[in-house]
Amino acid sequence: MVTPTRATIEAVLPLSVQDKRYDLVDGELVSMSPTGSMHVPCTASLCSSLIRLVE
């Protein structure tokens, strides 16, 4: 059995370039799919709703 190597944010940031994305989840590097065309409007809508809720 292989023990996963724990990663740091400093090691992950340079990897998230072009069409490849990586997230750091509980110290493990996870390859993520690229964001789609609906990602930005959905994120903006969610942020707007949360801001109104908090204010």
Image: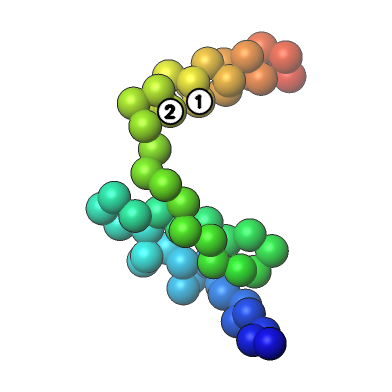
Please tell me whether residue 53 is drawn above or below residue 31 in the rendered image.
above
The residue singled out by tag 2 in the image is 39
Q: Residues within 10 Å of mark 1 (few under 14, many from 20)?
A: few
Instruction: Tell me the residue at 72%/14% (across/down).
Output: 53
Tell me if label 2 and label 1 are in contact, CB under 8 Å.
yes
The residue singled out by tag 1 in the image is 43
Q: Residue furthest left?
A: 18
Residue 39 placement (x, y as % from top left):
43, 28
Mark 2: amino acid: His
Residue 17's quadrant in the figure? bottom left
Please tell me whether residue 5 is drawn above or below residue 37 in the rendered image.
below
Instruction: Tell me the residue at 64%/69% (across/down).
Output: 27
Give the secondary structure at mark 2.
helix
Instruction: Tell me the residue at 37%/65% (across/down).
Output: 15
Going by the image, does 47 lie left or right of 16? right
Q: How far separated are the C-alphas under marks 2 and 1?
A: 6 Å
User: Where does the C terminus fall, quadrant-wise?
Assistant: top right
Residue 3's quadrant in the figure? bottom right
Instruction: Tell me the residue at 63%/80% (across/down).
Output: 4
Q: Residues within 10 Å of mark 2 (few under 14, many from 20)?
A: few
31 and 14: which one is in front? 31
Give the secondary structure at mark 1.
helix
Please tell me whether residue 34 is drawn above or below residue 12 in the rendered image.
above
Mark 1: amino acid: Thr
Residue 1 placement (x, y as % from top left):
68, 87
Going by the image, does 33 lie left or right of 52? left
Residue 5 placement (x, y as % from top left):
60, 82
